[in-house]
Amino acid sequence: MTLYLGVDTGGTYTDAVLMQDETRVVASAKALTTRDDLARGIGAAIGAVLEDAKADAAEIGLVSLSTTLATNALVQGQGDPVCLVFIGFCERDIARQGLDQALAGDPVILLAGGHSHSGAEATPFDAEGLRTTLENMTAPVSAFAVCAQFGSRNPAHELAARDIIQAKTGLPVTCGHELSARLGGPKRAMTALLNGRLIGMISGLIGATQNLLHQMGITAPLMVVRGDGALVSAELAQAHPIETILSGPAASIVGARWLTDEQNAIVSDIGGTTTDVALLRDGRPMIDPDGAEVGGLRTMVEAVAMRTTGLGGDSEVSLSGKAIRLGPKRVMPVSLCAQRWPDLVHRALDQWLANTRVGEFDGFFVVAQQQGAGLDTREAELVARMSGGACALSGLIKNRKDIAVLERLEARGLLLRVGITPSDAVHVLGKLDAWDGMAAGKALTLFARRRTSAGGALAVDGEALAQSIVARLTEQSATALLETAFAEDPVFGDLPAADLARHFLTTRGLAHHRGLVALDAGLNLPVVGLGASAQSYYPALGKMLNCKMILPEHAGVANAIGAVVGQISMRESATVVAVSDGCFRVVLPTGPQDFDTPDKAIAALEAALTEKARKAAEKAGAQGVRLSCEKQIRRAEIEGRDVFVETELTVTASGRPRITPAS
């Protein structure tokens, strides 16, 4: 019997599922994600699912991995420093399309070069300037991103820069044209920049998984879920980690389709860090035509049209004026921290509860995530105080400067703050019994004593606060679903979805207002609730939104299921451009080539893209490859004549991954 193993590594849990012939779930299991050593959490989940199924490692013919690590990193502003090499652009271009926000202080090298819209060289590439700058560069970076003007039409200058950088530094280089064939230099540069920032993180995850599989005797090929729900080889995912943003959510959409057989639905997947909402239309996930948006940054990555909100079971609970606020930051739940360091957590909580006044840092802890290199003196001193891997925040912060140091270490993913979360709230309410519920109760009781802007206590006790936290999460979840519905409903056009979701008429309609005016509102599609905590939070959502709520069996491991049942799909795109009357240009693997008719140019380009896509799919491990070609033709009427402007071709090669026969 050949088994399929699906693994999903999230911010809090790592899920594993075994399936037989893609038709039946044999077993599923969960383990805590271990950020300091990802292999431990992955190994625990795989070991548990194999034991549950009484299966042998030799029976596994395919392993597929989905992850939210890239998504979570971008939402939380984490990642390694990257240098952007910007060719043919000027300083003001950095302020466009969110590129300056994505850079976040990382170095930029501006160079002469670039091509025209037709792919002809506009300005010679300043290769010597790049060499000199690299020799004098002092800023520490982990990778380079290269983007040249109209590099998607002719990548010659990007490729030349890549070769120089690799020869000089030996560091990974991401070229903009490798990730998108679309125009828009600053946006393509941002996508390449974020890709470089994620290389270390995703390479570490894939490398840890591959080593672990080898140790466990699993010889099956490893696939990784892309942001559009398709599978790619582990090697390609390591080179283009940006394509794994929304990997976990995309897998959940595929899993939702398999679990429910719903053709049209809104899928809401709540994890530890984020809630991901997407639309299932005619049995397929909708693809975002503008590129994936994560953490407020719009990339050029083809991915499921997904609205990602910093809201999950591990969202930080904070006090804002008179009310509580959830997210977008993720923290470790106090109940989980207490399970790992019970003496430390309970001793500190008891001391704080014995005081009459709640201190600024009372109720918070800090946990070391991983060892960091390149720490400055203050950072190293702060980390050195954390003997045992965890400590109370009040014992770590000696002065106000330490707060800024702590925030820098958190941004790099080296430290994780511990505080109360919705996960702690459901422990207090008896809806969850996974970690230390007593510690959760103490922490919520302490937080309930905090003073609001009105001067009174936040809540009468910990249980009342827990109810408020769950109610707040339900409200924010409903808003996220409404925003998706308004954004995807064409009747509302470009009206801001966030404003419509919060509009007074919407809220009154949801409450079935009956006055002189009768108002009703709700979702006109069923909602499929996914995630380990969906059963704790989502039953009230259907009533609030006046719609059918579906909570399927195996909803907690939908991502891992989606990872197994997906297909390999490789796309190659390029454009035929009219240079002048009787001259139509394409950039082939051999270089730019001109044709005297658009049909000849299109045929040549289609043949080249078909061969490239087919080889890419086969290299990725696809069998029974199917090919399709889409053409987007642009024509214009000039002086009464119908004139060819350009045609964009996209060839898709898809197929199921090859499996290793069970031994």
Image (cartoon, rainbow, N blue to C red):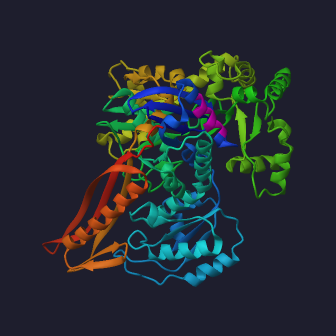
Which residue is outermost to the front?
Answer: 663
Which of the two residues, 90 or 593, is positioned nearer the viewer here? 593
**45 drawn magenta:** yes
Within the image, what quadrant is residue 346 found in? top right
- Residue 182 seen by the camera: yes
Instruction: Tell me where residue 538 appears, x and y as whole percent.
Output: 49, 23
- Look at the picture and state if 140 lies above or below 59: below
Which residues fall within the magenta stretch? 40-48
User: Which quadrant is the N terminus positioned in?
Assistant: top left
For the point 57% across and 76% down, which residue is it?
164
Drawn side of residue 283 relative to residue 364, left or right: left
- Residue 33 seen by the camera: no
Instruction: Tell me where residue 506 appears, x and y as whole percent.
Output: 40, 30
Instruction: Tell me where residue 478 appears, x and y as whole percent.
Output: 46, 29
- Look at the picture and state if 57 lies above or below 102: above
- Look at the picture and state if 286 lies above or below 362: below
Instruction: Tell me where residue 468 appears, x and y as whole percent.
Output: 60, 22
Within the image, what quadrant is residue 618 found in? bottom left
**83 drawn magenta:** no
Within the image, what quadrant is residue 331 found in? top right
Drawn side of residue 128 relative to residue 622, left or right: right
Drawn side of residue 387 relative to residue 58, left or right: right
Drawn side of residue 448 relative to residue 251, left or right: right
